[in-house]
Amino acid sequence: MKIAVAGKGGAGKTTVSGTIARGLAQAGHPVLALDADANPMLGVSLGVGAEKTDLLLGVRQGIEAGEVEHEPTIEGMVAHFGADAPDGVRLVVASRLDVANPGCQCCGVSPDQLLRELEASHRTVICDLEAGIGTVVRMEPGNADVVLVVANPTAKALEVARRAVEIASDKAEVIVLANRVRDDSDLELIRAVLGDRELVVIPEDTVIAAADRDGLAPIDLDRSSPGVAALVQLADRLAGAPVAA
Ligand SMILES: Nc1ncnc2c1ncn2[C@@H]1O[C@H](COP(=O)(O)OP(=O)(O)OP(=O)(O)O)[C@@H](O)[C@H]1O
Ligand SMILES: [Mg+2]
């Protein structure tokens, strides 16, 4: 299965991607987490740590600087532009390079193409997309099976979410996450824009904020806090019943 995570800048895409990836892995599923953001931070939310996450970006940028060898195959990219994250999650940084050589798989390939080409029969691929709707617009049917659209109770985030839902609905199953919900009025605001479709509610969570402050994975801080637990529950739903206790 392939899952893409979309939404406005700051909506919570990286938090959602990292926590669902870890949740899936803790339930026994092999997971490849793909960071498609030009400023890759998925490693931090996965629990790889800020320093190692920064090193991964360095490897990616090293291609541009001519210090790192190009990698012509998709699975080669998984091996060379990635790191092992906790619970066996494989993290791969596939952010777009400024000086891309379109003939070369590892730097010319766009993250959405990479998402399409990655083999997902034996693993779940979850991709933290760039902010906004650009990647969703470019996405072709089949690139991802499920698009998680992360909405927040703010006018701008909701407008991006509304457009993302509209565009992605033709291409994949869409699940909307109402993230950072504090109370019923937040939920009403989100419903007013997104209609009466199903919303997966992720409450505003002090554990997520604390994890962010300390550069930790929220799931390592407290798996049962309301926001984290809602994401773990969504991971279980996405994977069907957990295969491991
Ligand atoms: N449910 C939540 N409760 C509390 N804080 C949250 C929640 N979800 C996200 N945040 C906080 O919101 C901020 C943005 O989250 P995150 O980095 O995951 O968003 P993003 O969409 O990936 O942003 P960007 O577009 O910059 O990559 C972070 O400080 C994060 O800790
Ligand atoms: Mg992010």
Image (cartoon, rainbow, N blue to C red):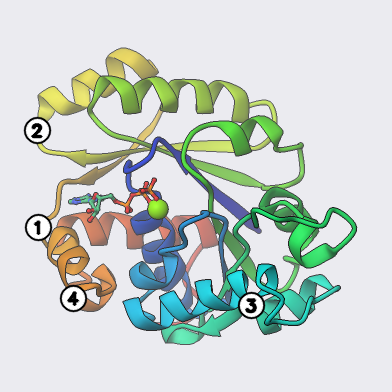
Give the residue type at disc 4: Leu
The amino acid sitting under disc 3 is: Phe
- Viewer-closest of 69 and 214: 69
Residue at which label 3 appears: 81
44 or 59, which is in the foreground? 59
Q: Which residue is mark 1?
A: 206
215 left or right, relative to 204: right
| Image marks 4 and 2: residues in contact by CB distance under 8 Å | no
Q: Are marks 3 and 2 in contact (CB under 8 Å)?
A: no
Residue ID at (76%, 37%): 141
Amino acid type of the residue that numbered disc 1 sits on in the rendered structure: Thr
Please name whichever residue, 29 or 75, is drawn nearer the observer in this view of the structure.
75
Q: Residues within 10 Å of mark 4 (few under 14, many from 20)?
A: some
Callout in the foreground (4, 3)? 3
4 or 3: tag closer to the N-terminus: 3
Q: Is residue 163 left or right of residue 199?
A: right
Name the disc covering residue 221, or none: 4
SS state under label 4: helix
- Tell me: is circle 1 under 8 Å from ligand 1: yes
> Can you tell which of label 3 and label 2 is closer to the viewer?
3
Mark 4 and mark 2 lie on one chain; the one further toward the N terminus is: 2
Q: How would you rate the neighbour count of disc 1 (Cα within 10 Å): few for under 14, some for 14-19, many for 20 or more?
A: few
Give residue 111's position: percent from left, percent from top.
67, 53
Q: Is residue 84 visible?
A: yes
Can the viewer see residue 26 in this picture?
no
